[in-house]
């Protein structure tokens, strides 16, 4: 079966970038799966653009996506159905030949949306800092998909793609509280703390695994090394780590923190969290060569 073809199409494009020349339109067949409705729509927007016609959307919901030629009497039509419990859509019926007159079609030709083109080029912004510019996108759509798009459409598509790619880590921050909750469920005795500012932006994160804490009390020397290191991701921040030494002088991590920047406030917060999991006692020694803030804390 060819049910994997559309999935492969996406993968292939991701793997080879500009190396492969093929059109998604030429793949389209009955029984074919699309990983999402967005890609299904993209395929037919490009198809209509490439073959100079327009279509009407008859029905679009979670279960069905049904379009036919802009000419009501024409035989060209596509009916796709959503696979229950997934984002997939499968083409159930596809009549690829038009019965309408070619001259009639010329008048209205569908233009792919910025979202569609943005979806097709999104992967090119995932790994590089800059990604293709608007002119490159015009060229790419011409050579890879056989369609001419305007500079302004390419510009909008680029904006869409960049925002979509950039948006992903920001959405990931939203998942932190849920992640911490699940982490505590799975690791009894763990301590986590998460603070945001008044606008909901990330400030401090603290994680200490229950197993690490139990190990610390059983077998570890009462020396804790605290240190901070700058994170190199786009969102920067500083990783704070509290580490103990075991009987063989091996490093034994007790707690991790991520803070927006390494300053007194951040260290103070981190040490307070650490104090909540490791009882302060006279035999406990702290070692650090990093920051005067640590000594203060
Ligand atoms: Zn037609």
Image (tube, helix red, strand yellow):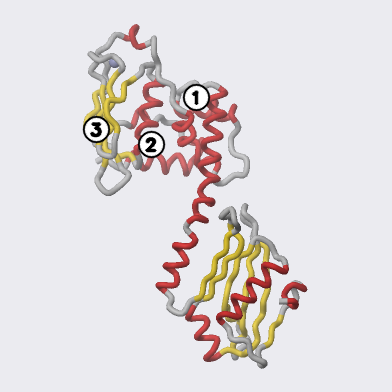
Q: Is residue 119 visible?
A: yes
Q: Is residue 2 visible?
A: no
Which quadrant: the C terminus?
bottom right
Q: What is the spatial separation of the Cα atoms under label 2 and label 3, in whole angstroms? A: 18 Å
Q: Is residue 227 left or right of residue 158?
A: right
Does the CB distance between marks 2 and 1 fall below 8 Å? Answer: no
* Numbered marks: total: 3
Q: What is the spatial separation of the Cα atoms under label 2 and label 1, in whole angstroms? A: 21 Å
Dot 1 beta carbon under 8 Å from ligand 1: no
Give the crowd class for mark 3: few <14, some 14-19, many >=20 residues within 10 Å. Answer: some
Q: Percent from the top left, x then y, of residue 129?
A: 62, 44
Give the crowd class for mark 2: few <14, some 14-19, many >=20 residues within 10 Å. Answer: some
Label whose residue precedes the other's in the sequence (3 or 1): 3
Q: Quadrant of residue 266?
A: bottom right
Q: Secondary structure at mark 2?
A: helix
Q: Look at 44% across and 72% down and name the residue there.
A: 184
Q: Secondary structure at mark 3?
A: loop
Closer to the eye: label 2 or 3: 2
Q: Look at 54% across and 71% down and name the residue there.
A: 207
Q: Read off the residue under disc 1.
A: 142
Label whose residue precedes the other's in the sequence (2 or 1): 2
Q: Is residue 191 left or right of residue 42?
A: right
Q: Read off the residue under disc 3.
A: 30
Label whose residue precedes the other's in the sequence (2 or 3): 3
Q: Percent from the top left, x then y, of residue 217?
A: 54, 89
Dot 2 beta carbon under 8 Å from ligand 1: no
Q: Quadrant of residue 286?
A: bottom right
Closer to the eye: label 2 or 1: 2
Q: Read off the residue under disc 2.
A: 38
Q: What is the spatial separation of the Cα atoms under label 3 and label 1, in whole angstroms? A: 26 Å
Nearer the observer, 118 or 170: 170
């Amino acid at each position: 079966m060819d049910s994997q073809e559309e999935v492969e199409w996406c993968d292939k494009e991701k793997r080879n970038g500009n190396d492969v020349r093929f059109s998604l339109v030429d793949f389209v067949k009955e029984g074919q799966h699309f990983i999402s409705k967005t890609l299904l729509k993209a395929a037919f927007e490009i198809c209509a653009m490439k073959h100079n016609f327009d279509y009407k959307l008859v029905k679009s919901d979670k279960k069905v996506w049904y379009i036919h030629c802009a000419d009501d009497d024409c035989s060209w039509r596509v009916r796709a159905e959503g696979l229950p419990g997934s984002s997939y859509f499968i083409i159930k019926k596809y009549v690829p030949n038009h019965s309408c007159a070619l001259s009639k079609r010329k008048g209205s030709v569908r233009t792919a949306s910025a979202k569609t083109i943005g979806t097709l080029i999104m992967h090119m912004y995932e790994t590089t800092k800059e990604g293709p510019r608007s002119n490159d996108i015009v060229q790419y759509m011409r050579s890879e998909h056989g369609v001419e798009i305007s500079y302004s459409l390419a510009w909008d598509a680029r904006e869409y793609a960049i925002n979509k790619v950039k948006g992903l880590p920001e959405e990931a921050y939203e998942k932190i509280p849920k992640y911490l909750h699940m982490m505590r469920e799975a690791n009894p005795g763990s301590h986590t703390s998460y603070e945001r500012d008044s606008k909901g932006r990330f400030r401090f994160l603290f994680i200490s695994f229950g197993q690490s804490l139990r190990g610390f009390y059983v077998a570890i020397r009462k020396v804790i090394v605290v240190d901070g290191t700058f994170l190199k991701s786009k969102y920067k921040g500083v990783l704070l780590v509290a580490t103990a030494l075991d009987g063989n002088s091996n490093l034994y991590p007790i707690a991790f923190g991520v803070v927006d920047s390494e300053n007194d406030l951040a260290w103070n917060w981190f040490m307070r969290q650490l104090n909540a999991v490791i009882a302060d006692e006279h035999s406990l020694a702290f070692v650090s060569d990093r920051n005067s803030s640590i000594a203060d804390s």
